Amino acid sequence: MTHCASLIDTLRRRGFRITPQREMIIQALAHGNAHATAEQVYTDVRQRSQAINLATVYRTLDLLVDTGLASRVLMADGQALYSTVQHGPHLHLVCRQCAATFTADASLLSDIEQVLESKYSFQADLQHISLVGVCEKCRGS
Amino acid sequence: MTHCASLIDTLRRRGFRITPQREMIIQALAHGNAHATAEQVYTDVRQRSQAINLATVYRTLDLLVDTGLASRVLMADGQALYSTVQHGPHLHLVCRQCAATFTADASLLSDIEQVLESKYSFQADLQHISLVGVCEKCRGS
DNA sequence: TTATCTCCTGCGAACATTCGCAATTATATC
DNA sequence: GATATAATTGCGAATGTTCGCAGGAGATAA
């Protein structure tokens, strides 16, 4: 099963309706760039069909994030970048300047997860977290 | 020297101009709630003077965040909460269910900061980060 | 004090995102 | 296939925040 078919299947199994809009949005997100803005997804879907509204794109992306199927990263300029969650926990490093993304080992965070749990009784969502910063290339500027 | 006088002094020493607007905004932020929205700061200042514009509030809050004198936390609903930085960097724990916030020791992250730097050449912004999760109260539901 | 040089502010428009509501439609049931 | 019903969509307006630009005013030095 392709990645985006499995996303659709998961939504359906959880009782959400699969509309043409949702299918197209998921396909655009799963096949496109690693991190896309809502506007990019909208433009992408729009090329295939007129039957799509920007508000629906936002609502669907929110749904995917809420169900844990996608992640949202807020950039410095206030825009949000979305991406589907692939397999297993990982850590995204997103450059504040150029929006390049890198993947780091999620096990880095496992100590912290335990400390937050035992010391603050807080169950943090660290499975698919994104950390914002500055990458090597953009360091100089 | 009071807390807000020292904030003003720091700005001045760094070459920024001290305008009545900036003074009032800093006073409102330093004396008010621990975490205030831009709108709250605006309303607060407005009671003292008409000579204030919401865009200026945002610009001044941004300036304070950029210079490290204040921190900004993005809530789940997209609103930003601002607070002056009192004692060093800290870590916000935000509950995904009830939006309650807790403060944790930021030193938890210093190891990770170094690993990201040495292993990935990535300079992460971990000074005033917010982690989302579920708090003790909401655990059951 | 005055002049000069930038920085800063106010305004209104633009931006990214969310909301409320009526109309539509996916799904389950017959 | 037809029907009922509740989730989903599209629309336009509202939200929180940022931007561009022209005018206003701190800071500095003479």
Image (cartoon, coloured by chain):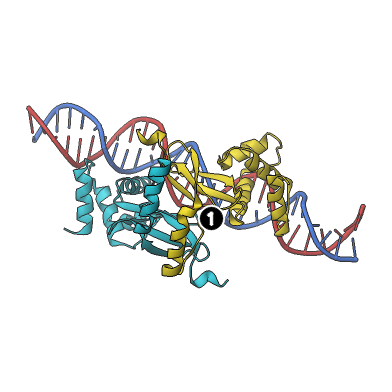
Chain colours: A yellow, B cyan, C blue, D red
Q: Is residue B17 left or right of residue A20?
A: left
Pinpoint residue A45: horizontal percent, then vertical percent: 66, 38
Left or right, residue A100 beside residue B82: right
Task: Tell me where residue B93 sits by quadrant.
Answer: bottom left
Work out whether residue B132 can be spotted.
yes
Relative to B32, A87 lies left or right: right
Residue displayed at 20% across by 54% down: B6
Q: Position of residue A107 (x, y in %)?
A: 49, 54
x and y, in percent, of residue B119 in the image: 42, 43
**Depth order, front residue of A45/B49:** A45
Q: Residue at x 72, y 58 (%)?
A: A13
Residue A63 image offset from top left, x and y in percent: 62, 54
State the residue in front, B136 or A109.
A109
- Answer above or below: position of A70 versus A42: below
Which residue: 32% across, 56% down? B89
Please, what secondary structure does the residue beneath circle 1 have? loop
- Tell me the quarter of the image containing the C terminus of chain A: top left
Which quadrant would residue C21 be assigned to in this image? bottom right
